[in-house]
Image: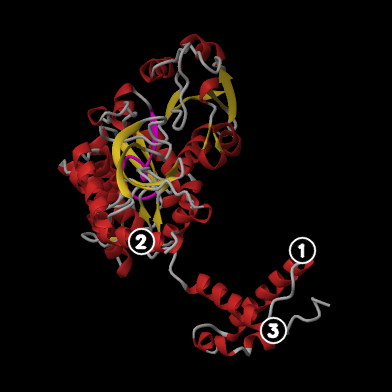
Amino acid sequence: MALRSLPSVDRVLSDPALSELSTRLTHDALVQLARQALSEARQRIGDGAAAPSPTALAARVLDLAEDLLGPGPHAVINATGVVLHTNLGRAPLSDAARAAALAASQGYVDLELDLPTGERGSRLGRVEALLTRLTGAEAAFAVNNNAAAVLLALTAVAAGREVVVSRGQAVEIGGGFRIPDVLAQSGARLVEVGTTNRTYLQDYETAITPQTAALLRVHPSNFQVIGFTAGVSLAELAGLGRERGLLVLDDLGSGCLLDTTPFGLPAEPKAQDSVAAGADLVFFSGDKLMGGPQCGLIVGRREPVERLRRHPLARALRLDKGTIAALAATLVHYLRGEELTAIPVWRMLSTPLETLESRARAWVVALGEGARVQRSESAIGGGSLPGATLPTWCLALGPFTDAGAGAAAFAGALRRASPPVVGRIEQDTVLLDPRTVLPEEDDAMLAACRAALAAVLPS
């Protein structure tokens, strides 16, 4: 009987609440939304729920329409303290990178046109010039992410042949990205050597056959193996590759162009060090410690880079004009030596502890009773510097003792703010870390805190 009581599509769309919506969507689109709302209702009735009223169905159509028509992805305030938060888009772009992407997207650009000659030009010519200057490589290329860079390289140089990798480096990183699966997809055959914790140069030497195309090193981006371990340096691997006529590939995962140790962090592999050590191809990400847009960067010797550039798969993985513009602007920051002030990621990582404490205390003063300052740790995130943290000072709200006003409820109210604020929860207390909150976001974050407190705490 409940199913029979559901109204028709026309009855749902005749609700007065949907009259304004008809000026924003086509009739066909409205019909599809009404059908979706009715289908959801049938599912709930099948699970034992009562039939919704026509008014409730119309309200659901409105919600579905707003999801379609609203902006997205939504801008959020990252107060988690995780600098490279994968779920929040990793590295925020610099002012110059954002402006460059906007300028490239507003009209026509000389993407593949050489203006002096009027002939077809190189899409990545400027990016290549910047990358080679910054890393010392002979040539460079860029694709849409680092996984694509590795896939392209293995497909272009090792399809149908063997690639030797340490067993401890045949890893899985975020999103189910597994090195053995990428090798299989490329058509290359994986040959694992050594053990999970100890691999020696002799293990590589013994594994080389006439079918071997390359030696691959993979940086374990998001985990550590410590204790009884042994590994082979990239320089040693490169020497073996030259001796046997094999390519040496170095997948840095995150990778970076700056030394991370002056900021109290462990050393993250630098692309220029891999080039200097003799790797033929080096792969790293653009949207992690590089601080730019999502892309996969490839630097190395000219001959193998050209093989990648000419491969048909390269076209399927190429960058769009906005990404190229943002990437070039980010690389220019390094060339000018202004990365610590211009690139948000490096500005966050290099912020002095006393500055963070001062901001957190200013937030406490602004919010008043119930707010306090608490020492904590900021994480790097994004598969960079696994296990590494930086000391910080946070705004702490809680602990919440009322059963209906727990930390989860308060964090949820913050996420429903406009703009949403994302924090972290420790011991029923919500922590908001100034390290990852941009200074211009302070007022909006404090307004969201006031509204969320009013929503979850009894008056």
Picture disc at residue 448: 2
Q: Where residue 89 sits: x, y (%)?
A: 41, 51
Badge 3 marks a residue whose secondary structure is: helix
Nearest the eye: 169 or 394: 394
Which mark is first along the chain, 3 or 1? Answer: 3
Badge 1 marks a residue whose secondary structure is: loop
Range of magenta residues:
280-294
Badge 2 marks a residue whose secondary structure is: helix
Separation of residues labelled 1 and 3 (CA atoms): 22 Å
Picture disc at residue 47: 1
Picture disc at residue 9: 3
Pair 3/2: label in front? 2
Quarter assignment of residue 212: top right
Q: Is residue 168 above or below residue 310?
A: above
At horizontal 54% and vertical 16% (from top left) the residue drawn is 208
In the displayed structure, does residue 36 sit left or right of residue 125?
Answer: right
- Looking at the image, can residue 126 be seen? no
At horizontal 32% and vertical 26% (from top left) the residue drawn is 266
